[in-house]
Image (spheres, grey):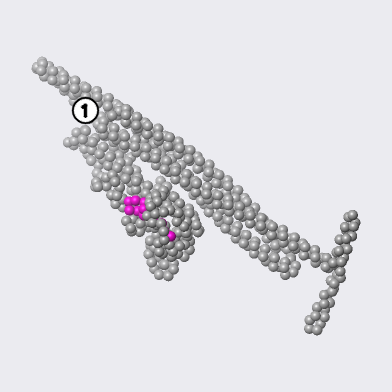
Amino acid sequence: MLQGLRSRVEAKLGAFFVPRELILRAHDRVTVLRLSVRTQQAGMCAVVLFLVWTLAASGGFVLQEYTIAGKDDEIEQQKLDYFSLLSEVAEYHQQFARIAGSLEDNQAYLLSALRDGVQGEEALARIEENLRKTAAEETRVVAARAGLGSKAERFGSELEAILERDQALRARVQSMRSILVDDSPEGGQAAEAHRMLGQRLQDLESELTQSDTARRQLEATVADLRSQVMTAQREREAAETTGGQFRDEIRVLESQLMLAANREDGLDRQISALEQSLETAIHRGDGLADDKSGLQGELVDARQRMSDLRAAQHSIVERLRDRTELGVDSIERTVAMTGLKVEDLLARVEGSGASQGGPFIAGDYSGDFNGDAELEIALSLLDLRLNRWNALQKIMRTLPLTVPLDSYSISSGYGKRKDPLNGRMAYHRGLDFRARTKAPIYSTAPGTVTYAGWSGPFGRMIEIDHGHGIRTRYAHLKKILVKSGQSVANREKIGLVGSSGRSTGPHLHYEVRYNGAPLNPMKFLTAGKHVFKD
């Protein structure tokens, strides 16, 4: 059977491959080209091999495209995970703020106890309850930090895997290029296929370059995320140290207050007894004059002990006021770096004590004031500094100190510049951040959206009111993701980068305004770096 099949195939090939002659005529000259059976078979084999090679190369390029597409999907997933980590970092900062708030409440309870006299057990129980809540918040912060660290490690391992796959892909492309260089195609069709495959290889290398750029951006993003995790860890450690110091001081104050209360009760009883004894001695006559002198001496000693107790209480209040001064000075320096006036902002905050002022001069109250008046003055001064500190905390929570983009470069600064469209000198009232189209834009501080829509040369624009006369603008957007009247949190996604309005390319025009006047946004970004550094 095989012999019969073989004979039939040889018969058909013999019928197809027969000696042929090509007659070519040119300028009355006739040329005859004889094609032998072997020559025709060799040519057919060359054509078949070329077709097989073309199909194999095309399949390889298709496989490369699928590989690159998978790699792009992995990069996008890494970006989504990074945005999730950013939200967890923001939640961690909120937890830190709640811990600081609990410490402020403890201070307030302590001041109330000092001002009203020792109410005793009820105030101390409330302080202990707040301390337990603060400890629970610290436990949650520790758990959040551990989660952030594990995710940062997972980011590093996934980046290493992407790098290894990228290197393997480059090696494969180089191998295909060597195949293209070594091949010697025959005829015009082979040359055209060679050129098309070379062009496709160049396109593939361009895509690989773009993928490499995206990978480097992702590595920079992961490095920035790790830096933020380290910053958050340092803040948590500082908060734990501060909380421990506050708890130690509160325990000391509690013990001193209890001792003071016991001493005052005992001294009051002694004074009452001495006064009664003195009155009795007076009624008894001159025979009791010696007893009266002794009782008067004891009365002087008791009053001296009460004066010493008041001095100790005054020293405690002074230490608390000095610690509050350090926090106030740090926040005031940060606000001054933005170019804003601290007193103007404080005048807008209710309960800040901004209607009172004047330079701070350490007073000497040891003159005609008695001990109670001196302690009352010290408590009043401490209360004023605490009010100012609370008002500055409210201001800091609304200042736009963060960057509105994750990945960017500054293409135009604040101030005078040449207009990019007509070349004439103009005044630029913000910063231009160059970024890719559809890159996410984030609010730089919590606030309320006052405008979201088309605004002439600004194109699609968003304006957010952060309170205290401070507003930010985001212009030339591709898409707006918020509505007018909507409340937004810090680092909340509000739009996408575009080139709408009077623009030469995709970028974000970012402005900071105070009472309607533009300010240099770079000062706010510098102040923000100072805050995270501290």
Amino acid at dot 1? Gln
**What's the residue at 60%, 48% (across, down)?**
161
Q: Residue drawn 21% across and 37% down?
A: 365
Which quadrant: the N terminus? bottom right
Q: Position of residue 419 (x, y in %)?
A: 42, 67
Please give the name of the residue rendered at 88% of the width and 58% of the height, measured from the top-left corner: 6
Q: Is residue 78 left or right of residue 513?
A: right
- Visible residue check, residue 190: yes
Relative vertical location of residue 424 with respect to residue 283 in this rendering, above or below: below
Residue 13 forms part of the magenta stretch: no
Residues in magenta?
Answer: 460-472
State the residue position of label 1.
304
Q: Position of residue 93 (x, y in %)?
A: 43, 43
Residue lying furthest left in this view?
A: 286
| Relative height, residue 342 to residue 255 (above, below) | below
Q: Is residue 468 magenta?
A: yes
